[in-house]
Amino acid sequence: MKDEKKFSNFILLWATQTLSRLGSSLTPFALILWAYGKTGSALSTALLTVSSYVPYILLSLPVGSLTDRMNKKRLMLLSDTAAAICTFTILLVWLSGNLELWHLYLVNCITGTAQAFQQPASEVATTLVTPEDKYQKAGSFNALAYSVVNMASPVIATALYSVGGLTLVIIVDLSTFTVAFLSLLFFVRVPEMEKEKYENNHIMMDLKEALVFLITNIGILQVILFLAAINLIASIYNAALPAMILSFESESVLASVQSTAGIAMIIGSAIATMMPTPKSRVKMIIISLFISMSSENFMLSFFRSPVMWCIGAFLGWLCIPVMNTNLDALMRSRIPSSIQGRVYAARNMLQFFTIPLGYLVGGFLVDKVFEPFMADRPATVFNKLFGIGKGSGAAFLFAIIGVVGVAVCVIFSKLNAMGNLEN
């Protein structure tokens, strides 16, 4: 496939999958609003994400090996269909008036399983439809898509939820899935790699090969562990954010803060697209995350103004597309495409296992530690710093994770193997 035609194929895949991700992000946001309104518990809403991530992480390694052996396009179609069936099931239960939290946890386990197949297949498919000299450009497109979804989904989900409830949100979700599914099925061509090399390999040998690759490429492994630590902190943040904002303000304020983060990411994506290739992608990743960790957490913690929260969200997310673009290009250029499925799966297991852990820790700390701590200490210096009443404990937690996030960036910046990765 000629490079220009190949890249136009990437654009079609990117555009339709972005539309599908936008639609798919509406339902989880609406379900968080529904669940927190029903329970008032940060832990109960955090478990929505935990139930999705646990099967995804547990299946990452074996699924990665299967991804390298199977047809990527077919795997994406099947996994997306399974997720859509789960969303439709939620709609039916909701319309029957019997929706409970345990239904959502169960369905999320199934969608997490489907995502375990879809994500590595999508990663490899992106590599296969992208010319090598377009990796950074493709990374910036992916960062832009992530930014648009983060900006638009809270506003769209809140608007749809207020007008037509969960029913309208899910209908829009399924509509975007249909467009992406038909596009992938009929118009996107995903070339396959040679399969002969896998005929005599056992899956366990494939998994061993992925782990050996990471162990022998210690710089890549350190980058993954660095991001695992950041994901832990970010997941605590995500678990605490709805609890704090919905305690002090309304659903529209939560949507505004998250949409501001998306706007920042769109601007950051434009910056990433125009930036020349940096001398060190690793340093750019570290600097981007240092700026993020040292800004938003503290502004959420010490200010009670929605305007200041939005400014914090803007500063915290502006550099994330720069980080993602450089991370994407670094991984695609360092990992051979023939083993990307299994290596990406191993990477996902190591890098993302801290996400459900962070949600559990964040929900527990808000409900059982920081909120009770603040409630027991009225009219103290803590109340002057973090506010009074429900939500002040979550604000206190943001100050803690801000300090930890900065410390993590400083510590990993001192690791030689990661720092010398591109030398």
Image (cartoon, grey):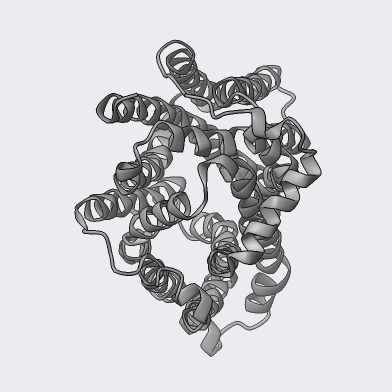
Question: Residue shown at 24%/50% (left/top)?
Answer: 273
- Image coordinates of residue 45 in percent, x first then y, are 65, 49
**Toward which corner of the image does residue 327 lie, by quadrant?**
bottom left
Q: Looking at the figure, which quarter contains the N terminus?
A: top left
Rendered view: 197 above or below 97: below
Rendered view: 270 above or below 187: below
In this rendering, would 377 be left or right of 384? Answer: right
- Image coordinates of residue 191 in percent, x first then y, are 47, 24
- Image coordinates of residue 365 in percent, x first then y, are 68, 69
Q: Looking at the figure, which quarter contains the C terminus?
A: bottom left
In this rendering, would 362 be left or right of 307? Answer: right
Q: How many marks?
A: 0
Rendered view: 182 above or below 421: above
Q: Is residue 229 visible?
A: yes
Question: Residue shown at 56%/40% (left/top)?
Answer: 338
Question: Residue shown at 63%/57% (left/top)?
Answer: 213
- Image coordinates of residue 350 in percent, x first then y, are 66, 58
Residue toward you, 299 or 173: 173
Q: Is residue 359 visible?
A: no
**Toward which corner of the image does residue 233 lie, by quadrant?**
bottom right
In this rendering, would 335 be left or right of 104? Answer: left
